[in-house]
Every structure is written in structure tokens, then in C-alpha cells.
């Protein structure tokens, strides 16, 4: 819906450790150290090193989101944000989380940290 601004500084994501994964029917939350949280409302793909899984906010998708529990204790090694709103995170275990901005009506995801919220 909103995309990511070309000059946005997301460097605070580097090195963040995944300390919580919270799974709901219509939202998945990824909690990191230093009070950083990514709330996904729209869609993400999770690549575990062999297979890729797509989560969408709908009933029955909790099993897909549960696969991301293997990210607990890992850190963000690199990331890439695109103007179309796609955010890709690569973790210390080689796994990847790609979050999409594919909702035309609602927020797709937001990133919070103390004093700042990025809404996409």
C-alpha cells in the first residue's frame, strides 16, 4: 500500500536477534531484541534452506507461520528493502523471510522500534 521510501534508513535491523514469534489468525509478529517488532498483516514467504512457504492472513495458515519458529535465536545478517514495499531479511542460519506490500486497502506490515514506526 505505502511501499518503502527510497531513502529510508533501516540499518537498525542489522544484527537484531529474533526473540519472539507470535502467531495469530490474521497477523504474525516477529519480535527482536532492542524493542524492534515487525507485524505482518498481509503476506510473507519463508525460505528454510530447502523449501519456500507462503503465509497469508487466513484460517489454517498457522502451520505455515509455525515454521518460522526456527528463526528464534538467530540474527538478521542482511536485509533489502525495495520501493514496492518488499522487505527481505536473511538470518544467521541462512534462512530468509520476505515480507510483501501487496494489500491495496490496508497496511501490509509495520516495523516498530522505540520512538519510530514504519507503516507499509
Image (cartoon, grey):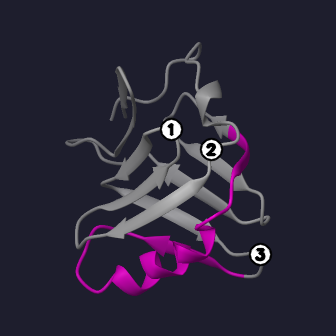
Q: Magenta stretch: residue 73 in it?
A: yes
Q: Is residue 101 visible?
A: no
Q: Secondary structure at mark 2?
A: loop
Q: Which mark is residue 49?
A: 3
Taking the image as shown, residue 101 lies to the left or right of residue 90, namely left
Q: Residue at x 51, y 38 (%)?
A: 34
Q: Compute the Cα span from label 3 to label 1.
A: 27 Å
Q: Which residue lies under the disc numbered 1?
A: 34
- Disc 2 crowd, CA 10 A, few/some/many (<14, 14-19, 20+): some
Q: Which residue is mark 2?
A: 16
User: Is 43 placed left or right of 60 in the picture?
Assistant: right
Task: Give the vertical position of 100 relative to 54 (above or below).
Answer: above
Which quadrant does the N terminus fall into?
Answer: top left
State if disc 1 and disc 2 touch (CB < 8 Å).
yes
- How many numbered marks, from 0 up? 3
Question: What is the secondary structure assignment of the residue under circle 1?
Answer: loop
In the image, residue 101 lies in the stretch drawn in magenta: no
Query: In x, y percent, where is residue 49?
Result: 77, 75
Quarter that holds the C terminus = top left
Q: Are marks 2 and 3 in contact (CB under 8 Å)?
A: no
Per the rendered image, the range of residues in magenta is 51-79
Q: Quadrant of residue 52?
A: bottom right
Could you give the CA–CA distance between mark 2 and mark 1, rounded to whole angstroms? 8 Å
Choose between 18 and 38: the one closer to the eye: 18
Q: Local crowd at mark 3 within 10 Å, few (<14), some, or many (≥20)? A: few
Q: Position of residue 12 (x, y in %)?
A: 60, 28
Of tags 3 and 1, the one toward the viewer is 1
Which of pointers 2 and 3 lies earlier in the amino acid sequence?
2
Amino acid at each position: 500500500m505505502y511501499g518503502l521510501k527510497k531513502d529510508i534508513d533501516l540499518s537498525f535491523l542489522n544484527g537484531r536477534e529474533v526473540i519472539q514469534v507470535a502467531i495469530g489468525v490474521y497477523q504474525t509478529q516477529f519480535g527482536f531484541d532492542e524493542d524492534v517488532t515487525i507485524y505482518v498483516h498481509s503476506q510473507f514467504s519463508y525460505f528454510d534452506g530447502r523449501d519456500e512457504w507462503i503465509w497469508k492472513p487466513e484460517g489454517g495458515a498457522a502451520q505455515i507461520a509455525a515454521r518460522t519458529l526456527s528463526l528464534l535465536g538467530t540474527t538478521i545478517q542482511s536485509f533489502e528493502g525495495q520501493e514496492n514495499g518488499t522487505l527481505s531479511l536473511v538470518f544467521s542460519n541462512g534462512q530468509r523471510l520476505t515480507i510483501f506490500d501487496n494489500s491495496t486497502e490496508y497496511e501490509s506490515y509495520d516495523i516498530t522500534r522505540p520512538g519510530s514506526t514504519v507503516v507499509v
